[in-house]
Image: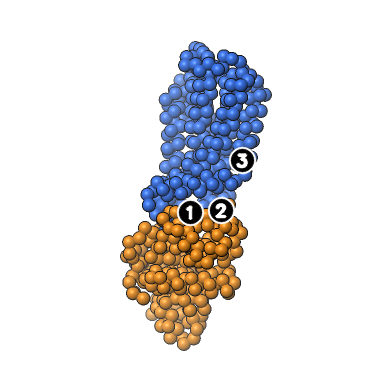
Chain colours: A orange, B blue
Amino acid sequence: MTGETYLTADEVTKKYGDVTAVSEVSLDVPSDAVTGFIGPNGSGKSTLLRVLLGVERPTSGTVSYSGPEAERQLGYLPQRPTFRPGFSVRETAAFYADLVDDDPDRLLERVGLEEVAGRPVSGLSGGMTRLLGIAQALAGDPPIVMLDEPASGLDPAMSRLIFDIIESIADAGRAVVLCSHELPLVEATADRLVVLESGRLVRTGSVESLREQTGGPLHETFTALLDQDRAAIAAPGGEQS
Amino acid sequence: MMNGNRFWTVFVREVRSAVRTRTYLVLGLVTGIVLFGLAYAGGGPAGGYVPTVVDTLVAVEVLVPTLAFAVGYRAIADPAVRGELDILDTYPLSTWSYVGGVYAGRALLLLTIVVVPLLALGVNVATTAGPETTVFASHRGVDSPFLFIRFVALTVLYALTSLTIAFLLSALARSRGRALVLALAGLLVLTVGSDLAVFAALDTGVTTGTLGGALAMTPAGAYRGLVFDQVLYVAVPGRSAFVPTWVAALSLLFWWGLTFVGAMLATDAA
């Protein structure tokens, strides 16, 4: 891990009307590492990811890229990737690869889909569709890859496979950011965690440093952190310690 | 990689997708049947090119935007709903390359559906009408294949303008349901509503003297006016256009440009 910062969010807030989805979040995304966003449903993980990606404009605050020069700076796997029907897996990979002069076969090999390259995308299982989404996210070798719930709704074997691929993406020198509810897999894969609740950043640090706070597995740490946060908000003054 | 290459990548995907969608083949066949049916019901092909245009003009005026909306109403809404636009936001693909590529691909499809049956009808006129229709006339008062080619060319312009309007509404829709509602509303306004609005304006400032100009400001009115001026009245000595020709031509170009830029801006914001 070089520890080089590839992306910086500074006091980022995102509001939809009166609803604040992300509130004054500041964080760095380091290279060669997997950064995991965890938090309950509606905590702002996906919104923060989309703001970092640039597909959502922050209401206030800034996001700045400081990674290496690249034709495509960020790769993205949405929560439910769907591809244009009527095309094969290879044709779909080729469409995205052509946009950045990449090799579709290399992308499919990278995620283990070369055997089903001729299959129509509508005939893929949920897990394979997710793998094709990851292949697309890797097109053009972006220095940062962002994955929104990459394993939600998948069987344990497919989830494990996807997290293994995610680990290897970071090992190849990229910065990986993911949000996920699969806490055991996140615990095993992420180098750094960002805990969110109600759009606010509750804690950030390595898995080990967060685990030290409760001495238990990540899900206990996670629950303890959220409880602390809720207690701090409910206390007179309402400010977090 | 050049932006032009990315435009080409998007364009090729649209064309491939169109070729694989059998519904479009059915649309083309139905268009052919409708055009031939109307032309033969009116006896146009036996009379020549201009009678054929007279027989089919009203139908084409409604059919072309209907086909354009069928081809384009989900062009931007669908990828937006699928999340494809969010993914493409992370690629070095400009909005112009994306919207332009999708538009070019669907325009090629639309023009195939519209122009092939029209040209087939023209060939049919050439083989069934009287010998005077084989004259490639350059003067007024004579029916000629040139007039039919002008009709086809004006129909192409009208089709392309209708398609950009469909694209704009698709980009504004952001859901498949809303895309359908907007398309139906847009089609109604384009084919009927705009003319009605002009006639309703007769009470509020538009005079019979400026009616032609006002009609030329709407896409359907501009197309109709141009067909009358450049096709039908050419074969009828002593008749002149009911809309100013240049105003009508510029109006179609204006609507094309305005809605295309609007579609790009709306796609950017989607």
Asked whether disc 1 touches disc 2, contact meaning CB atoms under 8 Å apart, the reply is yes
Q: Residue sitting at 53 percent across and 72 percent down? A: A161
Query: Is there one chain holding both mark 1 and mark 2?
Result: yes
Question: Is A127 on the left or on the right of A55, as rendered?
Answer: right
Dot 1 or dot 2: first in sequence order is: 2
Residue A166: x, y in percent? 47, 71
Question: Is A10 on the left or on the right of A78, as rendered?
Answer: left
Q: Is residue A191 above or below residue B25?
A: below
Residue B127: quarter of image: top right
Q: Which residue corresponds to mark 2? A: A87
Q: Which residue corresponds to mark 3? A: B25
Amino acid on which disc 2 is placed: Phe
Q: Is residue A18 above or below residue B266?
A: below
Mark count? 3
Residue B250: quarter of image: top left
Question: Is A13 on the left or on the right of B241, as rendered?
Answer: left
* Dot 2: element: loop
Q: Residues within 10 Å of mark 3 (few under 14, many from 20)?
A: some
Amino acid on which disc 3 is placed: Leu
Q: Nearer the viewer, residue B270 or B95?
A: B95
Q: Which residue corresponds to mark 1? A: A95
